[in-house]
Image (tube, rainbow, N blue to C red):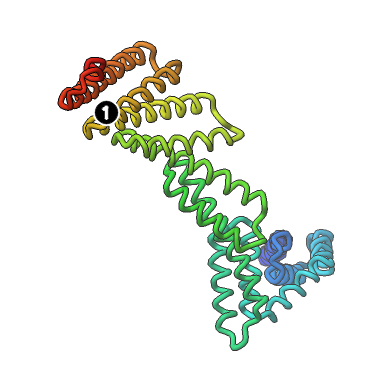
């Protein structure tokens, strides 16, 4: 009866409307896949959407035609055809070449570790071939080195951020070593690696100098600080505060070195040498007086002058005793 007819008509409407909704969704997904350059998946999705439009009758006929027209435009576009053709050609490529193309894509996207893994795999495949083309091997190795360089550079940056200067130096040394073999690495990236390496070298020199200073290894401390000073002066970002601190450390190291030599000469009864070293220490104190605290500097200078005087007295007394022993009285009297 009428009720049955209404139920059938309603069910039919809902069926056709459901097919339309699915077809509409399918063509939208097809377009998304085209935009993502996933050509084979887009082809399948558009074909499925087209099948769904064939099941729509009576309702939404204009909308149905619009969906079919959209699918036709996608399928007949040069971009879509070329994309499908590339997919087919790619399937025909040897496995090593497919892997290498994926590696190139990852490298261009900045996915360094993924590209390195893929280049390594491609290299394994080519090496396993009965006859390997040297040009192909070089190309893969060069690209692989670019990925390795970028990984080492990133590792160096992270170590610098953590102020782990020794680890940073190791990573950047590795990065710069790779640049020697590879013309593909951009000049800007090499310049950055060199600048970061200089930064780590400077900090490592400072750390080494401070450690040697703490151990009273004055000669070593002086060498480290002087190297650091040279680097800081050459840097376009030289800091006046850092330069002053380095000059102060150098001054102290020189003074302590001279005092140490004087003390050693005194212990060895080398009186003339001891006096000379005390003189050097006094002159250095005067030279670096502006950098060092005035009161402390003056006190140190007075102390060194007393030590020099004491050494001179011992030296002259011993020489006078020798003259007296030899009955050489005039020089003995003069010394006394």
Q: Nearer the viewer, residue 305 or 218?
A: 305
Q: Nearer the viewer, residue 32 or 9?
A: 32
Residue 333 placement, left or right of 71 = left
Residue shown at the point (51%, 46%) measured from the top left: 157
Helix, strand or loop status at disc 1: helix
Residue 166 vertical position relative to residue 217 in the rendered view, above or below:
below
Q: Residue 221 at x, y = what percent?
A: 38, 36
Quadrant of the snapshot with the N terminus: bottom right
Residue 147 placement, left or right of 34 = left
Q: Residue 322 at x, y = what percent?
A: 19, 27
Would you identify the image quadrant in which residue 223 lies?
Answer: top left
For disc 1, the marked residue is: 271
Q: Residue 96 at x, y = what percent?
A: 61, 77
Residue 200 placement, left or right of 118 = left
Outermost residue, left direction? 325
Residue shown at the point (20%, 19%) measured from the top left: 329
């Amino acid at each position: 009866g009428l009720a049955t007819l209404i139920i059938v008509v309603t069910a039919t409407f809902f069926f056709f409307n459901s097919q339309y909704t699915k077809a509409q969704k399918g063509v939208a997904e097809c377009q998304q896949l085209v935009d993502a350059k996933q050509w084979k998946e887009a082809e399948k999705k558009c074909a499925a959407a087209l099948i769904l439009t064939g099941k729509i009758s009576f309702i939404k006929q204009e909308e149905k035609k619009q969906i079919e027209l959209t699918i036709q435009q996608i399928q007949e576009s040069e971009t879509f055809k070329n994309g499908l053709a590339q997919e087919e050609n790619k399937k025909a490529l040897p496995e090593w070449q497919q892997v290498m193309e994926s590696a190139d894509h990852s490298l261009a996207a900045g996915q360094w570790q993924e590209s390195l893994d893929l280049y390594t795999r491609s290299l394994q495949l080519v090496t396993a071939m009965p006859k390997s083309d040297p040009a192909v091997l070089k190309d893969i190795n060069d690209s692989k080195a670019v990925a390795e360089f970028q990984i080492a550079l990133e590792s160096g940056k992270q170590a610098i951020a953590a102020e782990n200067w020794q680890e940073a130096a190791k990573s950047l040394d590795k990065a710069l070593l790779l640049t020697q073999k590879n013309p593909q690495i951009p000049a800007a990236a090499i310049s950055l690696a060199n600048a970061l390496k200089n930064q780590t070298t400077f900090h490592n020199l400072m750390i080494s100098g401070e450690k040697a200073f703490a151990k009273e290894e004055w000669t070593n401390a002086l060498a480290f600080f002087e190297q650091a000073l040279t680097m800081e002066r050459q840097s376009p970002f030289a800091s006046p505060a850092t330069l002053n601190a380095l000059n102060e450390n150098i001054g102290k190291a020189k003074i302590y070195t001279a005092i140490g030599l004087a003390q050693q000469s005194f212990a060895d009864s080398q009186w003339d040498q001891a006096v000379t070293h005390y003189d050097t220490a006094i002159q250095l104190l005067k030279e670096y007086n502006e950098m060092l605290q005035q009161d402390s500097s003056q006190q140190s200078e007075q102390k060194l002058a007393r030590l020099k005087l004491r050494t001179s007295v011992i030296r002259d007394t011993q020489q006078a005793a020798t003259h007296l022993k030899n009955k050489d009285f005039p020089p003995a009297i003069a010394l006394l």
